[in-house]
Amino acid sequence: MTQNTTQSLKELAKRRGFFIPSNEIYGGTAGFYTFGPHGTALKRNLEDVWRDRFTYQEGNMEIEAPTIMPEDVFEASGHLETFDDMIIECPECGESIRADHLVEDNTDIEEAESFSTDRIMEIIEENSLQCPNCGEELADVEVDDFNLMFGTNIGPGDSSPGYLRPETAQGIFVEFPQWKEYARNQLPFGVTQIGKAYRNEISPRKSIVRVREFTQAELEFFIDPEKDEPEMEDVEDVELRLYPINEQDKDGGEVLEMTVAEAVENGVVASDWIAYYLGISKKWYERIGIDMDRFRFRQHLEDERSHYASDCWDAESEVGGDWIEITGFAYRGCYDLKKHQEHSGEDFTVFKPYDEPKTVEKATVSPDMSVLGPEYGDRASDIADELGRIAEEEPERFEEQESISLEIDGETVNVPVEKTGFTRKEVEETGEHIMPETVEPSFGVDRILYTVLAHNLEEDEVDGEERTVLRLPAEVAPVEVAVFPLMDKDGMGERARKVARSLRESGFSVKYDDSGAIGRRYRRQDEIGTPICATVDHQTLEDGTVTLRDRDSTEQVRVNVEELEKSLKGFMDGNDLKEF
Amino acid sequence: MTQNTTQSLKELAKRRGFFIPSNEIYGGTAGFYTFGPHGTALKRNLEDVWRDRFTYQEGNMEIEAPTIMPEDVFEASGHLETFDDMIIECPECGESIRADHLVEDNTDIEEAESFSTDRIMEIIEENSLQCPNCGEELADVEVDDFNLMFGTNIGPGDSSPGYLRPETAQGIFVEFPQWKEYARNQLPFGVTQIGKAYRNEISPRKSIVRVREFTQAELEFFIDPEKDEPEMEDVEDVELRLYPINEQDKDGGEVLEMTVAEAVENGVVASDWIAYYLGISKKWYERIGIDMDRFRFRQHLEDERSHYASDCWDAESEVGGDWIEITGFAYRGCYDLKKHQEHSGEDFTVFKPYDEPKTVEKATVSPDMSVLGPEYGDRASDIADELGRIAEEEPERFEEQESISLEIDGETVNVPVEKTGFTRKEVEETGEHIMPETVEPSFGVDRILYTVLAHNLEEDEVDGEERTVLRLPAEVAPVEVAVFPLMDKDGMGERARKVARSLRESGFSVKYDDSGAIGRRYRRQDEIGTPICATVDHQTLEDGTVTLRDRDSTEQVRVNVEELEKSLKGFMDGNDLKEF
């Protein structure tokens, strides 16, 4: 069953131009796939529907940043330091193996990713695990951290290392100072991006599920955590299937069913914002044809979370018996903006005006540089800065002590208070600078495409014959309508080509096919999920009607060519074909 | 003037969210730009209109291949060997300089790119050229070839080098054996791809014109050169501005104006197929708003052509006094397919059936292995293969000589003819395997976007006030309609938000704006090229009409809200606003 599903999917993907392993003429390149014509159309439709929901309808801005980014970015973001997988190299055959997968595949341990390299080495030794390629015992072989970013050099020489971005998000974060200008300094606002991301996986596997180059659709939504609330009324009744940490931890733990409102009320989902995005995403998955009986939201275990996330849920779909992460919902807090602010020295805060200006007491210094200068030379200005900091944080010291003792470059310096120009004064403040927090839904487009294919691929029987049918929602189908002449003679071919052209001009995605028996042409379209086939036959030449055939029911109705566009629009909007 | 154009473009691009230099918080990364919300929308619209014309309307297949490709691909394609620019490194300050640009910028020489490195060194010495950074004399400094591909490693270690593709085309060529299956082995057919390509430029310059990461929209059209003809009737009357080699070569050479039909007839454009694509592309450039008075097709000089092209024309646009290549039209012949066939050993031919089966004489061998085996051991099968090859290519040797002398592993072997089983027989052949030739229009999306902005950016005066206006065609404008409440009170805000939402649901790209004076809101929309603004005012609350204001004429008409969608559709289709 498991094998069957993924195997028939693989065959269909190749036969019907959804996706193929890349560069097979050169023996293939593990972890890279090429989308064929129908896969490309399906992928683009999924991206468009995502854009409609998460950019347009939410009123967010879409941007497009480069895929190559300089080292500074990933030093700040933490990817250079921590974006690693565990690798073990077989001393016998040289095979590179992902150590945590070796453990998971050969023991009862799950989530070995969260263990230390030392612990993984112990487990390998305790279980006498062997190289899956040559059978060599791997006890005592070093397990190392391997950084998953693809590195390159920007410009000639190697003085400017760059990396292919491991997530599209960083291209949004680094330009935050500009985005906040476009948002006129008003929180909340969201920035989306659809684009390539890269991870140099040690062992790519599972078709297009774990690949080295993939497409993400990410939203970074920036909020004032003290003030901004999501529009919960839009989602409160949406039913969720949730698999929280405590259910995962206990024997016989279950997926809980509850509405978004209940999940927030019961504290199952801690953040309103995460709950909001689970709600709108659930409706979006249904829209694109994911089977909600093979779907759940799973909370990340504590040691499974990324370095930037304080709470994280995954949307997971079931394919061939495996659960696949198709979206991550992370509460990133102010991790990223803060890191980039620290690393770059630029301002990543947003000015938040008070409802009314506030009068506050401020302690300030105005050191007598004519004294500090001659006495401390080069260090005078550092001393002045440090006095300012102390005045702000510990003003009482200036009143309680006769001199302020501070440390500069490891040396203790005492400055008499009368030389510091310390005063307290009342100032009026109109607002404060706050660091926004970030909520991130991050969608894996390739995995979603894979799920949509898997969940809609069916075998059924029509007139006693087996057929393969892909029951895609019309909105995402690569071809919306196929146009056939019954035969390419008596003017039927010309008439059909005219129909195809006119539908194309009206914006439909159309396939014209005049090759082979009509039954075979139906089967081809069934396999790529085309919802409607329109056939020009002898009767068309007499009364101007064509046969419309519904993919799912295989029922047929006749519609006048003049009415065709309207009928198809109605069908795409969800009306029954029979009503025409 | 020149400076002004590019400077105001740069300012507008940043102010209004078209594009910004990337990573400025870290000092910037030369050659990388990030598209802001309006740039991203404009870029996507340009891509969609391209897809409509070059994929849908032409009936081609669109695919999506990875951006990282393995070394084999570029060994075969020639990029590893020849995709170089000339680099000179200043011995004083270490600056890397593109040597041909140094020559062009400081002498009267044009197209220095086509010179050898030795010749460039001579010119540098003759002209005493200096480092543009520190002024050091560069005579006698080595000029080297620098490969422009970004390199990386696929998987752990460095045993699998990979490169970021320098053109999207190779992702199409390497999978040709699969595409021909999808095309059911019928030529001609075309494969398109829109995606990122990368060139590690030595000195990126001119805003988004010469960058290190950019987007291409490429069509590879595969033809049987003996049979396939383009549909010239679709383009024969299209007027072209052509700048062929002989005009470029002579003093006072001119751009020639002629129709596609004339260009082919006069032999100015040698290939029908190139002429066809110049024709449909010209109409496409007009559709997206490129100014045909600042446009030409220029033929590549012979030494300027890429390693794969036999004839090449560039579409060039004028911006700020410079001519920018925005599209290359290359007749690549069978260069790429042949190279990949040779390098991979896979079959890149297409079977071309004869009109009627042909009877041909074939010379074959059937060596007596019971003799060859014992006598030659391991080499027997190689000998049999070689005999087969000789029978095919030089059958007369079997009739003229008593034994066939052949070389195996550097050793000469003589095989008596009677042991070879040589015969000539008549066989019926139904067709032949041919290598398709390739015609390639390759569009630079970023440069086209830059041109579209530059050619539509104008300053004019409205009611005595200067304004900046971007006269984009409605089809590509980032925002199609902006909706304003005159003020956010008396229910105007709610009404306007309802109008905006309903237009969005009907598929319009809509901007809602209620901030600042109405005049300022108009100016903002003028600067991003929004063709129509709709304002909800007091009268709306009384009679249900809104004010529509035309960007170009600034004229206003009132339209009933019920009619709004229809009116806007009509306007987008080219009707005058006044007709409503």
Image (spheres, coloured by chain):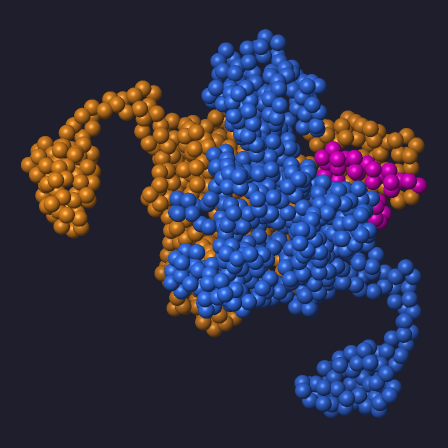
Chain colours: A orange, B blue
Number of numbered labels in the structure image: 0
Locate residue B498 relative to residue B516 in the image: left or right: right
Q: Nearer the viewer, residue B330 or A437?
A: B330
Residue A314 visible in the picture: no
Residue A31, by quadrant, is: bottom right
Q: Locate residue B572, reporting x and y percent.
A: 67, 28
- Is residue B364 positioned above or below A512 on the image? below
Q: Nearer the viewer, residue A349 or A255?
A: A349
Locate residue A535 relative to residue A55 in the image: left or right: right
Q: Locate residue B286, reporting x and y percent.
A: 68, 38
Locate residue B398 relative to residue B293 in the image: left or right: right
Magenta range is A490-518
Quadrant including the C terminus of chain B = top right
In the image, residue A541 lies in the stretch drawn in magenta: no
Q: Locate residue A124, reporting x and y percent.
A: 42, 63
- Is residue B148 positioned above or below A235 on the image? below
Looking at the image, the residue that sits furthest to the front is: B251
- Is residue B151 positioned above or below A404 on the image? below
Residue A83 visible in the picture: yes
Going 36% across and 61% down the picture, which residue do you hit?
A118
Residue B24, by quadrant, is: top left
Going 51% across and 22% down the picture, which residue do you hit?
B465
In the image, residue A511 lies in the stretch drawn in magenta: yes
Q: Nearer the viewer, residue B327 or B51?
A: B327
Looking at the image, the residue that sits furthest to the left is: A402
Q: Locate residue A300, reporting x and y percent.
A: 44, 44
Going 87% across and 88% down the picture, which residue do you hit?
B400
Going 43% across and 34% down the picture, which residue do you hit?
A180
